[in-house]
Amino acid sequence: MNVLIVEDEARLRNSLAYNIPWEEHDIEIVGMAENGLQALQLFERKKPDIVLMDIQMPEMDGITLARELQRRDAMVKLIILSGHDSFEFAQSALELGVVKYLLKPAGEHEIVQAVLEAAEQLRRELARLNRQMQLEERWEQHLPYLRNVFMQHWLSGKYDLWEVSQYSHDVRIDLQPDWQYVLVVLDMDPLPEGETRFSAKDRPLLLFSLNSIVTELLQQAAAWVCTDANEQTVVLFYAPQEEEPNPHLLRVNTTVDRLLAKVKEFLKVSASAGISGSTGGWEDVSKLYAQAGKALQNRKLYGHGIAIPYREERQTDPMVLEVQPNLEKALEIALETGDMDKARAAADELWELGLGKAEQLDEVHEHVLYLGGILVRIIQKQGWRVKEVAGDDYVLFQNTQLLASKEQIRSWLYRSVERIIAQVTCQRKAVSHHTVKWILNMVEEEIDKEITLHTVADRLYVNSSYLSRLFKQETGKPFSTYVLERKMERAKTALQKGAKVYDAANLVGYRDVSYFTKVFRKYWGVTPREMK
């Protein structure tokens, strides 16, 4: 700690400075002054922590000097060493926050204790100030989060009006009760098919980027930006109450259109926005937020990358869902037979008769449930699990609300049709492979009998033409050619091992030896005896 001594009497001044072992107490004397004016000059240059001063001095008395020192540095600690036992002086000193008021001649120990007490008091105050600064720094660091929490609670209607006023002041949001507000909710659109820069896993990153872009672009605007519980970006635009609502809404619409264009420019993917249908005061904010959120949902009807103002729902009878049993059956047959063209045609017609005509959000949801029900029924009728067939789209069957546009719904419908047909094809290949394998084993086991395509088809209870196509597709050769090859190979092997021609013929199902000889010669180019 640094000490400045102010004393007009030279002998006492030097005694205080040099006769007391200050260094033993980590105290340094940084200057000595013989009057108040000189003390002020030294104070500005040396910046002492403690001033040990007389109260009766020429040019400026100690009380006046103390006031001036306190004005210049409120943290400085003052100790008065006075030769006058005056109640008036002592009272003035206490009012100025003087640490000690000592009477001359004070002893060395008393003076040292007063300085050490002042030093300890200063250390405590500095520590408290440091803690306060740390708390304020932490408060500043957490302020964005606290503001966001306040906004979320306000938007959700959790606050009374007095709480809005109190808590907004606490988080340093300057809200006025006589302002009018417009609410906007912004969200990233579902990624288009073929998007390679981002995937569904990048949605949190895209939502963060959206919020950052909006916050940056609206720094100078009359608006507050936050995120809601769904991580969507919410903007609270405000304007004086005397401004007409329609121009305010029009200005917000224009601003939001520009924001969406900038988002598309920066991220190369689109975002959409819902805008409340009117302006309102503090008490209307949660209602305006609900309007903006509902308007955003209508991107299923109107498409992506646009700002959608809230409109009151028309009081008209909703379109009655018409079940299409013939089209359902046509789609089912096309899927079961693996006919992609007919399946797409049936799906298109179902789309046009339902979702193609939907004009309200509830109608869209109703038709999505209808289409999903058809697909689930077809999948389960085949004995499959929806999760296995749908793959990544299984979550869309569980929650159709995730389908955020008509285009996305249509893509989901087409993908589901393609996956069902792929499952049918895969199953057919597995069945075909099993069937052909059974036929090959049968040929080997019954090589000594007459084997024809018709007899095999009768055993399998299938059409012989279908079986012929299946066998040729799997083996690359007609059934009769394969059977002839196996019989001739078996006969050749038997003859080479010493079998008689008659026995070789019987071994491969030929009862007429002359006919066997004719077939063998035609196949191998030599007679059975020559082969033997």
Image (cartoon, rainbow, N blue to C red):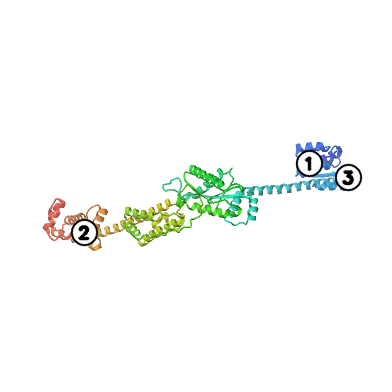
Identify residue type, mark 3: His
Image location of residue 153, percent across then percent down = 59, 55
Badge 1 vs badge 3, beta-carbon distance below 8 Å: no
Pick whichever, 165 or 497, lies toward us. 165
* Lower sequence index among marks 1 and 3: 1
Pick whichever, 343 or 506, lies toward us. 343
Identify residue type, mark 2: Leu
Q: Which residue is mark 1?
A: 69
On screen, residue 455 versus residue 332, left or right, reads: left
Instruction: Say what secondary structure mark 1 lies in.
Output: helix
Instruction: Say what secondary structure mark 3 lies in.
Output: loop
Task: Using the numbered discs, state the Cα–Cα distance from disc 1 to disc 3 in whole angstroms.
Answer: 22 Å
Task: Using the numbered discs, state the Cα–Cα distance from disc 2 to disc 3 in whole angstroms.
Answer: 135 Å
User: Do we see residue 109 in this rendering?
Assistant: no
* Mark 1 crowd level (few <14, some 14–19, many ≥20, 10 Å Cα): many
Instruction: Say what secondary structure mark 2 lies in.
Output: helix
* Mark 2 crowd level (few <14, some 14–19, many ≥20, 10 Å Cα): some
Disc ID at residue 84:
3
| Quarter of the N terminus within the rendering | top right
Residue at left offset 33%, top offset 60%: 326
Badge 2 vs badge 3, beta-carbon distance below 8 Å: no
Pick whichever, 101 or 67, lies toward us. 67
Vertical arrangement, residue 108 with respect to residue 365, above or below: above
Which one is closest to the eye, mark 1 or mark 3? 1
* Lower sequence index among marks 2 and 1: 1
Image location of residue 303, percent across then percent down = 45, 49
Residue at left offset 25%, top offset 61%: 462
Disc ID at residue 453:
2
User: Do we see residue 482 in this rendering?
Assistant: yes
User: Residue 364 occupies which quadrant of the picture?
Assistant: bottom left
Task: Using the numbered discs, state the Cα–Cα distance from disc 2 to disc 1 in whole angstroms.
Answer: 117 Å
On screen, residue 138 versus residue 335, left or right, reads: right
